[in-house]
Image (spheres, rainbow, N blue to C red):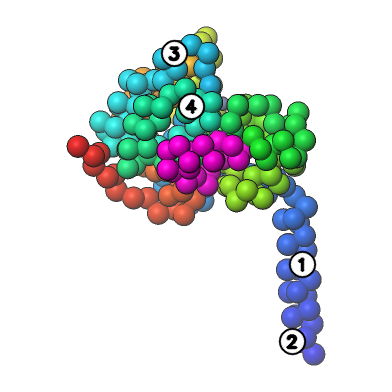
Amino acid sequence: MRHILIGGLLAVIGILTLDALAMDAGAQVITSGPRTCPAVALTFDLCPVRNKPGFDAALIQLLKERNIPATMFLSGRWATKHDSETRSLLAVPFFEIGTHGQTHAHLPLLERGAQEVEIQDAVTLLASRFGRPTTLFRPPYGEYNDETVQAARALRQRFIYWDVVSGDPDPSLSAEKILDRVERRVRKGSILIFHANGKGRQTREVIDRLTAEVLPKKGLTPVTVSELLACQPQPPTPPRP
Ligand SMILES: [Zn+2]
């Protein structure tokens, strides 16, 4: 009798949990990795830009020279306009690649179907033109609604948000200020958002000091988003010659 009761209770809890997950689209939005993991994910959005170069070559060079794992979220429009830069990012073995929408649209303004198209087109572009399958998605402007989350899930994309916003595109912020903000907020499992499309004037300097001073001091190792979510920090891989 007691066993039956406990079994029934567990079944009810199971159903409630599944229901809660199904009802709460927010549960699908990933803002961090496990808080027990002494690692963080440095992520860089490549939103479309009107004027070239639209690519922070000095930042990428720094990441490559120091073998710093990073995750890049490419918008389709950016990748189309930056063919050689995209290929150079794909060639770095310790960079993980995700997508950031095709046209960098304000997704909540679109219906569910149009949101799917916007998300899928960038995924298709990366696969067909650059031969790279991608399963990580970052919403443009950080904007989303329940339909966005459902669309990403239907397309088998993991919905990657952040818990530490650097604010690096803000031209009024000094490197000191950005670093100070990041240092106060970053902790085990954090996902940090920066930009690699040249909009962040201080990004290179911030990443330089963050990875050389702040993260080592806190005992935090940079890893890719997938590594962080699996909480299996990998030793850095040497870059290809
Ligand atoms: Zn963006």
Indicate the position of residue 46 as horizontal and vertical percent values.
49, 27
Disc 3 packing (10 Å; few <14; some 14–19; many ≥20): few
Task: Please tell me in which quadrant of the rendered image residue 176 appears.
Answer: top left
Spatial CA distance of label 4 from label 1 is 45 Å
| Between discs 4 and 1, the one toward the N terminus | 1
Kindly identify the residue that appears in the image at 77 percent across and 60 percent down.
19
Kindly identify the residue that appears in the image at 48 percent across and 16 percent down.
199
Kindly identify the residue that appears in the image at 29 percent across and 32 percent down.
64
Please name which of the two marks, 4 or 1, marks the residue nearer to the observer. Answer: 4
Please name which of the two marks, 3 or 2, marks the residue nearer to the observer. Answer: 3
| Between discs 3 and 2, the one toward the N terminus | 2
Q: Secondary structure at mark 1?
A: helix
Q: What residue did someone put label 4 on?
A: 80
| Between discs 3 and 4, the one toward the N terminus | 3
State the residue lying farthest toward the left. 241
Q: Is residue 102 magenta?
A: no
Spatial CA distance of label 3 from label 2 is 68 Å
Q: Do we see residue 225 in this rendering?
A: no
By secondary structure, the bulk of the magenta-drawn segment is best described as helix
Spatial CA distance of label 3 from label 4 is 13 Å
